[in-house]
Every structure is written in structure tokens, then in C-alpha cells.
Amino acid sequence: MIREFVHSRTGAVIAGSTVLVTLGGVGGAFAAGQIRSSDIKDQTIMRRDIGAGGVGSSEVKDQSIKRRDIGRGGVGSSEVKNGTLGMRDLNDATKSKINEGGSGLPGLPGADGAAGADGADGAPGLPGEIQTFTYNPATGDLTITTDGVPQTLDLLPLVG
């Protein structure tokens, strides 16, 4: 009877399944227990050892990636979200330039201010038509003749 069972189709399927389950279970357990993180020397896993998408942001602890972990040119400005960098993220030279005010490019001109108040009324004008005027730079006197009447105004002398 056992001999018939072993040679039957049902017996073959059951025996084959048993072998696969046994090997799969043992093989998986063997592979899973074969290499542990303590077996891997620090700094030995390289980018080429990890497949594309093998490590995502959910597997990286917050604040754990440091400047030394990123190669020169490894992160560009297009990959940094606006508003996410602060003074703590900048190197000392850049902080110094910001704190000193630096000699950066000039900013854009500002908008025009509001109109000021009207000025005081000026002195009354001279009557008639101006016929002549003379200015003495040494004394600052301006003499204006209108309708034959000279009038002298005291202005500031020109300093040479």
C-alpha cells in the first residue's frame, strides 16, 4: 500500500511539496541568518551595492545625514526646497558674509515716497522788467536793475 501511494500521482505531489517546503523554509532561515549588520565592516557598503530605490527617506533617520556624507556637488539648489535652509545649515564663511552685510549686489530701487508738503511762499518779486543784473562773487551781492531802480540782494559769496 505504501508502495502504491509513493508511485501514485497524489503521493508524488505531496512528497514534492514536502521537499519544497522543507528546503524553502530551511534555505530562507539559513540565508536570513547568514549575514547580520554586525558582520559588515563600517564604510564598506557602497552605492553600487544598493539597487536603485533600495534606500528611501523612510529608512534614513532624521538629521542623520551630515555634510561629510554627501560628495561635492551631490545636492544642487534645484533639489533643496525653498525655505528649508537656515543659518544653522550654512558654513561659517557664508554666515560671516551675511552678518557683515557683505558687498553683494545692490538691491532694486524702492518705490517713490509720498509727496511732501508745499513750501513757504517766496519773497515778493521785483516790480517791472529786469534791465540788468550783476553778481559780485567776492561779496555775494546780486544787483538787479528794474525800471531804472537798482536793488541789491545779499547772497552767499562763491568760494574758490
Image (tube, rainbow, N blue to C red):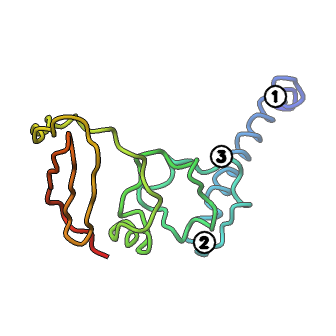
Residue 66 drawn at (x, y percent): 48, 66
Residue at image point 15% right, 46% down: 149
Between disc 3 and disc 1, whose residue precedes?
Answer: 1
Q: What residue did someone put label 2 on?
A: 39
Q: Residue furthest front?
A: 148
Could you tell me which secondary element the residue under label 3 belongs to?
loop
Quarter of the figure with residue 75: bottom right
Callout 1: 10 Å neighbours few (<14), some, many (20+)?
few
Residue at image point 55% right, 67% down: 69
The foreground one among 78 and 156 is 156
Amino acid on which disc 3 is placed: Gly
Q: Is residue 43 left or right of residue 11?
A: left
Residue 86 drawn at (x, y percent): 37, 57
Disc 2 and disc 3 in contact, CB within 8 angstroms? no
Callout 3: 10 Å neighbours few (<14), some, many (20+)?
few
Q: Nearer the viewer, mark 2 or mark 3?
A: 3
What numbered label is drawn on residue 53?
Answer: 3
